[in-house]
Every structure is written in structure tokens, then in C-alpha cells.
Amino acid sequence: MPIAWATAWRTWQMTRRAYPWTYAVGTVLPAALTIALAHLGFHVIGGGAVGDDFAAGSGTTAYLAYIVVGTTAFHFAVRLILWSAKALITEQRQGTLGALLIAPAGRLPYLLGFTGFAVLSSVLEFLTLGLVVAALGITVPVSSVPGALLGALALIAAVFALSVGLGGLMIAAGEAHISQNTVFIMLGLVGGFTFPRDYLPEPVRWFAELLPTTSAMDVLHGSFTGGQSLPELLPRLAVCAALTCAHLFLGLTCLPRAEARAVERTY
Amino acid sequence: MNPLRHSLRVFAAETLKQHRRLFGQPLVVFSMLVWPVLQLATTYYTLRPVATASRAAENWPLAADPDRLLAFLATGTLAYAFFFSLVQSAWHLSFERTTGTLELLFLSPAGRLTLMIANGAGALLQNAWLLTCFTVAALTGFGTLSVSAWWMYGIVLLALLIPAVAWGAFLNSLLVFSRDSAFLYTILDEPLWFVSGVRLPHFALPAAVQVVGAVFPLTGSLLAVRGALLEHRTASELAPTLLGLGALSALLLVAAALILRVGEARARRTGALSLV
């Protein structure tokens, strides 16, 4: 716990001093633009209605609220990956990875510290997104408050589990730009964030089921626009928890090998 | 050596440099083919509920058929990739600042504007050819094209290429003289697709956004490309758009020349590579 706290505090100090606005603009702006795009499309083209296949796939006709939940969750996930998965490769680029590896600090609390910081700082930034949503006059219904809270927690845990493995991949490959953007775009396409997954071809849907974020998004959509109660959401929460544990286990098993490879390649 | 021949040699050399730097790089394949295609799929699925609404066909006849909605978005993706590849190239040019080769460029007798144009054009050809082939093949395969004459394809290519190169020269000149290039990169990436109507038809945007969008040549390029490829427009119908594009491109080139002159004069006097 002291390690997690120290990491979070260090990151907060560094970000506050060096890059106060870059990250905030970089994630809130795309989310706001996607919501604005959906808003314009819904009113000007759809005439305030959506096609029947949307309601069949998502269980709601509240297209804009669905987009708001999905877009916010997607960019929140992107933010968490940017911090947690890139933590190790940032150390590598700055030349401090070696020092971190020989320090008597566990990797899991270190990464948890990064995620903790990322969650807190992102929550502040995404409150500004609330202003955009309010300005556009979109109301988001909530059918189950505990379901929404558990869904958000599940999403954070799922993204963290993905980030551990991804971070290892990044330092092993010595490359972050291509891998991170490919992961973001894949997630946005298959993860069921901004449209029901029924639209996708069958094999892609099965691939999506392997990602823990997919079931977390089902819980989030279900508890906001889906009109589902907590007991109805529990099966998907259980799936998410199982997949998160599997991904975390896989990531933590591979991470030491990735670290060894990263260090050996340097010398 | 006469000035034209000199400029052509500078142009060829800078384009060759871009070819060697960019060709076959994994980053180019990802950022110019894999990501745009996946992003296109995401945008298509996100907008599909709106386009399949019962009243959508009367508001926007083009989108009544899902294939044609996809073609509309694909042309947007293609044109956007053209312009974005230039934002990326201008961003790379700012590395010449950090590595110290920019001063050498300014010491050389090469024409500054020629260099900026060649840098953009070289990057464009290296980056966008793959996506162009892909989009052309996909559009032809879907059978959604509606073109009035075969030579309209030539007009489409010119309507993409000339404004994009002018835009690239302008961005390059601007970024050579600015310190915080990452910020411009952020500003020009996401808002560019929104204001230019890449993912929505032009009429769906609010008036204020349309006014802002008119500043970017991508807006006009998209109108011309979609008019010629999807809406069966003839050259005379598109003439006002094309003339506007030509004027905007000329204006961008003049602005680029002006920025280069002012910036260089200031650099000589103060030793600082910045406009203000």
C-alpha cells in the first residue's frame, strides 16, 4: 500500500507541474466531439428517432444517452490504459526502468498506484464532459444505481487487468505508439461501447467475449439505459470478474519475462 | 542553372528523402490503413441507428441504403487520411528543429517554399497510396459509385491532391516556427474531422461550425469528392466548389510564403526560430 500511494503521489506532482492541460484536452475533446456528432445525426438526420435494429440490440431507444454512457466509458478506459500500460515503458524511456526493477517494490502495487491516480484525475476531467452533455440537453436515465457503481468498478478492474499484460508487451517490444492505438481502436470497435454488438459479425462477437471490458460495458449499459435491476446484472458481473482474474493472472505471469527481455535487449 | 530546374531538383531531393524515411514503415501501414479502416467501421456502426430511422431517408436520401452510408463515410475517411497524413508530416518536420538540421536547411540555397511543398507532397504520396488503392477497390466492389464521366476521377484526384499539398505547405511553414508542435497536433486531429463534415453531411452541421469548416480546405475537397463520386455531379455543377478550392489553396500557399519570409527575417535578426 505505501508503494501504491507513493507512486500515485509522485505521478500527481509530476503531471501537475509538467503537463497540466495536454492530457485533459486530448481525451475530453474527442469524447465531446463524438457526443456532438451523435447529437447532430440523431436530430438532423434521424429526425429524433432511431432504427428498429438499435432498440432490438440495446434494449432502449434512448440513443443519445446510450452514446453518452458508451463514449464516456470508452475514453475513460483509454485514459486508464494510457497511464497504467504506459507506466513501465515511460520508465524505460526515461532510463529509470533498471532502478525500478532492483528497488524492493512490488510491480502490482506500483501499477495500482498509477491506476489510482489515473482514476482520480480522470473523474475530475470527465466532470467537464458533464457540462457538454448538459449543454446539449441530453438526459441519461439510471435504472440501477448500485449496478452502475459496480459496473464502473468492474470496468476499472477490467482495464487494469488488460493494462498489465499490455504494459509488458510494450517494454518487450520497446514500442508504445502502434500497440496502444491498435488496442484503443479494437476496443472501440468490438467492445460494445457506442453501438450494440449485434451489428458485428459472429466471429468478432466471440472475440469480444474474451475481453473483460465487454461484459463490464454490458453491465454499465444495462444499469443506465437498459432498465435492468441489480439481480439481472449479476451474471454479466460474474463473467467480468472471472475474465478480469484470468487476464490479470496472465499479465502478471508474463510481466517478469517481458521485463527480463527489456533489460537484456538494452545491454 | 535556371530557377525552375533548380526548384525541381530541390523538390525531387526532398521527396526522395521522404520516400526513404517513410516507405514500408510499420507506423505508416497502421496509421494510414489499419486504423482508418477500423475507425471507419466503428463510425459506420455508431451512425447506423440514425441512418436506419424511418424519417432518415427524406432528410438525407444518400443514407437510405447502408452501403451508400458506408461509401459516404469511406470517402470521408480517405480525404481525412490525406489531410491528416500532412499534419503528421508537419509534426515530423518539427523534429528537424530538435535535431538541428533545420538551420542547415535555411543555410542552403534551396527555395524555402519549394522545400515545404516537397516535404508535404512526398509524405502524402508515401502515406496515402495504400489507403487510396483500398478505398477505390472497396467503392468499385460495392457498386455504390455514381460518376457522370470517366474524367471526373481525374478531377477527384486533383481536388484531393492540390488542396492537401497546399495545406501541407502551410502547416509545415507554421510548425517550423512554433515550439509546441504537439499542441497543434492535438488541435488539428480531432476537431478537423468534426468541422469538415467527414462523418456527417455538410447540411447537418450548425451554421457556426460550417463557417469554421470553410477555413479548412478539407471541407471543399470532401464536397467535390462526394459530389463527383456519389451524387453524379458534372464538372460544371461542381465548378463553384472547385474554384473556391483553387482560391483557398492559392491563399494557403501565399500565407506559407509569407510566414517563411517573416520567420526567416526574424531568425536572422534575433536567432530565434519563432514567429512571435
Image (cartoon, coloured by chain):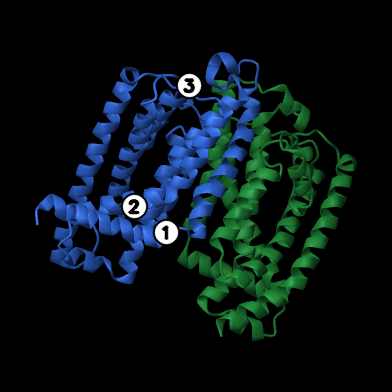
Look at label 3 and name its amino acid: Ser
Look at label 1 and name its amino acid: Leu
Provide the residue designation for mark 1: B22
Residue B107, image quadrant: bottom left
Look at label 2 and name its amino acid: Gly
Which image quadrant: the C terminus of chain A? bottom right
Which image quadrant: the N terminus of chain A? bottom right
- Label of residue B146 in the image: 3
What hue represents chain B? blue
In the drawing, does residue B15 fall left or right of residue B41? Answer: left
Q: Chain of mark 2?
A: B
Please tell me whether mark 1 sits on a helix, a strand or a loop: helix
Provide the residue designation for mark 2: B122
What hue represents chain A? green
Can residue A234 be spotted in the picture?
Answer: yes
Identify the residue at image location x=26%, y=53%: B116
Q: Are marks 2 and 3 on the same chain?
A: yes
Can residue B261 be spotted in the picture?
Answer: no
In the drawing, does residue A28 fall left or right of residue B256? Answer: right
Asked if disc 2 and disc 1 are in contact, CB closer than 8 Å, the reply is yes
- Label of residue B235 in the image: none
